[in-house]
Image (cartoon, grey):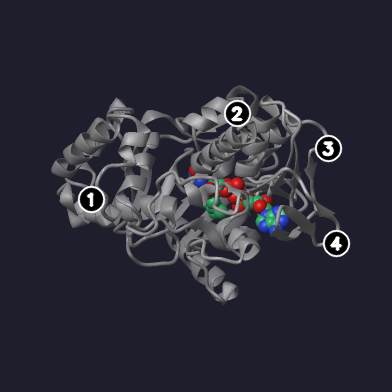
Amino acid sequence: MEAQVGIIGAGLAGLCCGLRLQEAGISFRIFEASDGVGGRARTDIVDGFLLDRGFQVLLTAYPEAQRVLDYEALQLRSFEPGALVRCGGKFHRFVDPWRRPQHVLSAALSPVASLTDKLRVARLRQRVRQGSLSAQMEQPESSTLGLLQHEGMSPRIVDRFFRPFLGGVFLDRDLGTSSRMFSFVFRMFAEGDAVLPATGMGAMAQQLSSMLAGGSVLLNSPVDSVAEGEIRLASGACWSPDAIVLACEAPAAAALLGESIPTEGQGVTCFYYAADAPPIEEPILVLNGDSSGPINNLCVPSQVASQYAPAGQSLISATVVGVVEDQQALEYDVRRQLRDWFGESVDGWRHLRSYRIPFALPSQRPPALSPVAKPARRDDGVFVCGDYLDTASIQGAMVSGRRAADQMIAALQS
Ligand SMILES: Cc1cc2nc3c(=O)[nH]c(=O)nc-3n(C[C@H](O)[C@H](O)[C@H](O)COP(=O)(O)OP(=O)(O)OC[C@H]3O[C@@H](n4cnc5c(N)ncnc54)[C@H](O)[C@@H]3O)c2cc1C
């Protein structure tokens, strides 16, 4: 098809949109403001450590990731299912006995949840796996907290497990996020593994970008405005393609379109440390099951994928939900909590870098901000994609990119 498409943004959504257009034989250019592809899923190399721009994981069950990514080439490394929950001054294992039957006894004795709670979790796990993903998104909706309460979960399991676990996934410790998002995420955790690519989360975008025709992604090319079919770059250059796709995060899309795309978001702060020895040997997520202290979750990425740290060293990632102005004071409190958890060896840890991300995820609180698939074509003919138009996730970003391309191909054909 003889058409030229301009895509703005080389995050996962923009790259997947380009990939689909390429499959259909449509030529395109992607304009990316920053110096690399991947948007919110990028990895920096600092002193030989791989630092994802905020701790995140790929869930192998994401259907769109399965479709577009070459998992084998990414050398995925899995987290141990379940978590270590810090409460009452100790770490307690909270496992899924269906996936790790050898831990069934410790699961039965865990102070994180009663047996009744665990049976309810098992029932919920079964329920969220039924029906199609799209049918799930049409289920009646409440907040996640409302759903957990409706399912009869005790305050103990909510506070010790669900709040830090889902708080870390949604970046929302109040659990006001849509119950549909909960069902989606819980299902994805149940049906696959939580993994890191061996060379960092940024490897996903690198792989997608390598599948695109050379020269189709233009880095360091911020777009200043989009109007009447024309893309105007900050450099002053203009281009009038046959169609335009905005693949920016919600606040940037709102700024370019000058109108009311919801821009509420969830923020996060991630601290990275280097240590001579790992504080936890296992590739497992650590959750803060006490309501005190700033850390929500922690892990040792180098115990998941050894490439995350130089030989003989360990990388520790501590996540705080939200952002504050005084980063220094926050780092002081984080280190104090780490010392409380792991002892004086923490004094020898080297602070590598912190990532303060005010808009990490679009808010998905019902009823206004449901994570349902939204149309890609706007009344003014501009197409849009990004995680704010689907589930706020890697899956949502990828599938919305393909959806925008498909709707555009249909429009161009007609
Ligand atoms: C800390 C953190 C933890 C997360 N954890 C998880 C997780 O565990 N699992 C999961 O599934 N998801 C997670 N996510 C969400 C996931 O990373 C995002 O949903 C996804 O990467 C969004 O992709 P996107 O393409 O929609 O947007 P983005 O990645 O934001 O891409 C938008 C791109 O547009 C570019 N852009 C913006 N304005 C302009 C302009 N004017 N001109 C040109 N380019 C422009 C930006 O530079 C950017 O590259 C997490 C996100 C963060 C930040």
Q: Is residue 213 in view from this perspective?
A: yes
Q: Residue at x 62, y 61 (%)?
A: 257
Secondary structure of residue under mark 3: loop
**What's the amino acid at mark 3?**
Gly
Spatial CA distance of label 2 from label 4 is 35 Å
Q: Quadrant of the N terminus?
A: top right
Within 10 angstroms of label 3, few (less than 14), some, or many (20 or more) residues? few
Of labels 2 and 3, earlier in sequence is 2
The label nearer to you, 2 versus 4, is: 4
Residue lying at the far front of the rendered structure: 414
Look at the numbered discs 4 and 3 and tell me whether their residues touch, using CB distance below 8 Å.
Answer: no
Pointer 1: what residue?
147
Disc 1 residue: CB within 8 Å of ligand 1 = no
Query: Disc 1 or 3, which lies upstream in sequence?
Result: 1
- Which structural element holds mark 4? loop
Out of 103 and 236, give the one closest to the viewer.
236
Residue type, numbered disc 2: Leu
Q: Which amino acid does the dot numbered 4 rest on?
A: Gly
Q: Earlier in the sequence, mark 2 or mark 4?
A: 2
The answer to whether marks 2 and 3 mark residues whose Cβ atoms lie closer than 8 Å is: no
Which residue was labeled with disc 3?
Answer: 215
Q: Pointer 1 and pointer 3: residues touching (CB < 8 Å)?
A: no
The image position of residue 34, as x and y in percent, is: 75, 54
Measure the C-alpha gap from mark 4 to mark 3: 20 Å
Q: Nearer the viewer, mark 4 or mark 3?
A: 4
